Amino acid sequence: MPPCPHCPERAACCAVVSACLGIRHAGAWTCNGRCHIMKQTAGDFFGADGTLTDTDRIVLRAPVRSDLASYIGTFAPGLRDAYLEEGEKGQELREGYWSDVMSEGSLFCTIVDDACHERAGFCCIEDLADEDPEIGVRLLPEWRGRGVGADAVRALMRGVERVSGPQAFVAKIDSGNVASQRLFSGLGFAPVGVDAPIFSDPSLLALIEENSLGLIDDRLRALAKELGVEPRTLLSHALVFRREPDARGTDGPVRRH
């Protein structure tokens, strides 16, 4: 079969998701723009030295087992304590989490400071098969508020697009996490909707909202109006931010590969 003319990599497309979603009908190609990302696995994005990309400040490299403690160190205190618990339960949690990190269907990158070579946290795309890959970033407490998160997300998007071609991305952010909302807004993301948590039992969500009504302020009301939802909905749902493939905000000094 000849290559799809719409695919950024001119791949020989077929209906198999793992190859490409451009499909030929009656001698004509149709392509929904997803040809490029679906066939990639984590190993396709890293160079021979294990590095995805770097900037003037940080390096994004492939995770290694010795990174696990720093990954867990980015968690909220209660969750972190559960993962650090001694004994079989804690070990099971750590092994399960590390298996997810190392999955070929996800892309996790350890963030390393280029000057002192210390780990600052990690950024990731948990599912490369998503139509719009979801970006996440977590930093150790001592690295927050220093611009590292924005550098890491920018470098991750640039590194992915260098392999996959232009790509839309999404980020899901807690409505109270104003710092992350500002970070992603500065990188060309815009709020487009809300997403219910995994435990989306209506009665539980209603209880969460009822117990948090005091958190509704003018900022939350304005955001709810922009998204067309009730303000209380933002108390139990994550905000969905989306960056279009041609959005500005990723420009910056990114080097390597």
Image: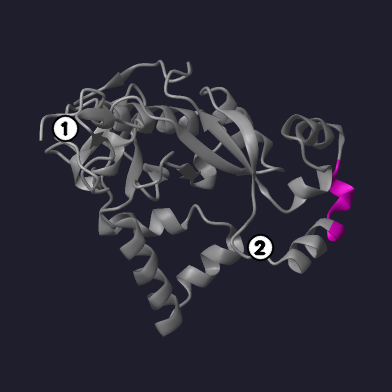
Q: Are marks 1 and 2 in contact (CB under 8 Å)?
A: no
Asked whether residue 79 is drawn in magenta, I would say: no
Quick check: 87 above or below 256? below
Amino acid at pointer 1: Ala
Amino acid at pointer 2: Ser
Q: Secondary structure at mark 2?
A: loop
Q: Residue furthest front?
A: 26
Percent across and percent down for residue 22 are 27, 35
Would you say the magenta stretch is mainly helix, strand or loop? helix
Q: Name the residue at 34% across, 30% down.
A: 33
Q: Name the residue at 46% across, 42% down.
A: 134
Quick check: 160 above or below 207? above
Q: Nearer the viewer, residue 25 or 154?
A: 25
Quadrant showing the N terminus: top left
Provide the residue designation for mark 1.
11
Percent across and percent down for residue 87 are 42, 83
Tell whether 153 sits left or right of 80.
left
Q: Quadrant of residue 67?
A: bottom left
Residues in magenta, as a range: 210-216
Asked whether residue 211 is drawn in magenta, I would say: yes
Q: Quadrant of residue 59?
A: top left
Crowdedness near tag 2: few (<14), some (14–19) or many (≥20) residues, C-alpha within 10 Å: few
Quick check: 5 above or below 139? above
Please say whether residue 114 is visible from this viewpoint.
Answer: no
Q: Nearer the viewer, mark 1 or mark 2?
A: 1
What is the number of callouts on the image? Answer: 2
Provide the residue designation for mark 2.
200
Q: Name the residue at 43% across, 32% down.
A: 153
Q: Secondary structure at mark 1?
A: loop
Q: Name the residue at 45% across, 81% down.
A: 89
